[in-house]
Image (spheres, grey):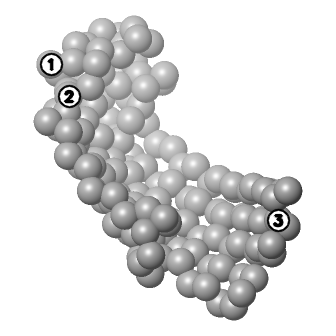
Amino acid sequence: MDTFFIASEKVDSPSAFDLATLSSAESNSAGSGFSSSSRSDSSQWRIGIELRANQHWDLRLGYLEDDTPQPAAGMSPLLSDADRKAYMGGLGYHTDRFRFDIAYEYVDPETRSTEGMSHDGFDGTYESESPLLHMSFTLKF
């Protein structure tokens, strides 16, 4: 079952909402030893807002929550997925000739343990964080 509701920046709306319910995924090609039947359904929630400060400047804020479909037994150093939250903020400057966007995203996955059930023998507790910087420049001609 795949269900998607997406309001994107093309929609003339002050905010954007995403809901994605994902069906069981295909088996992992990285060799973690579990089949698609061992995964569970998962949901992802996103909310974002863009404020047009004036004719040239835009300010963006966003938040997401993403539940993992991966069971603890399928975790390994190559695929240590966990439920996560992410916080985003961005700034855009645009004219008739170009556009420059910069954004910061902090992804904060929960600490997760294999609970002694790893298929590949990679038992342990996995912790991570991802501070990300995104930039784009668009030239119109």
Q: Residue at x 44, y 62 (%)?
A: 8
Q: Quadrant of residue 90?
A: bottom right
* Nearer-the-camera pick, 10 or 4: 10
How far is disc 1 from disc 3 in space, using C-alphas? Answer: 48 Å
Which residue is farthest bottom? Answer: 54
Displayed quadrant of residue 58: bottom right
Q: Amino acid at mark 2?
A: Ser
Q: Are marks 2 and 1 in contact (CB under 8 Å)?
A: yes
Find residue 44 and report its horizontal and vertical position in percent. Answer: 30, 52
| Residue where numbered disc 3 is placed | 98
Circle 2: is it few (<14), some (14-19), or many (20+) Cα within 10 Å?
some
Amino acid under disc 3: Phe
Residue sitting at x 61%, y 85% = 52
Q: Nearer the viewer, residue 10 or 5?
A: 10
In the picture of the structure, the residue carrying the numbered disc 2 is 24
Q: Quadrant of the N terminus?
A: top left
Q: Quadrant of the C terminus?
A: bottom right
Q: Is residue 42 above or below residue 59?
A: above
Q: Is residue 16 visible?
A: yes
- 8 versus 72 height, above or below: below
Question: In whole angstroms, how far apart are the C-alphas of marks 2 and 1?
Answer: 7 Å
- Judge left or right: residue 32 versus residue 135: left
Q: Is residue 82 left or right of residue 58?
A: left
Q: Is residue 121 above or below residue 65?
A: above
Return the mark for residue 37: 1
**Secondary structure of the residue carrying numbered label 1:** helix
* Circle 1 Cα neighbour tier, 10 Å, few/some/many (<14 / 14–19 / ≥20): few
Q: Disc 1 or 3, which lies upstream in sequence?
A: 1
Residue at the image point whose x is 75% and y is 82% from the top: 56
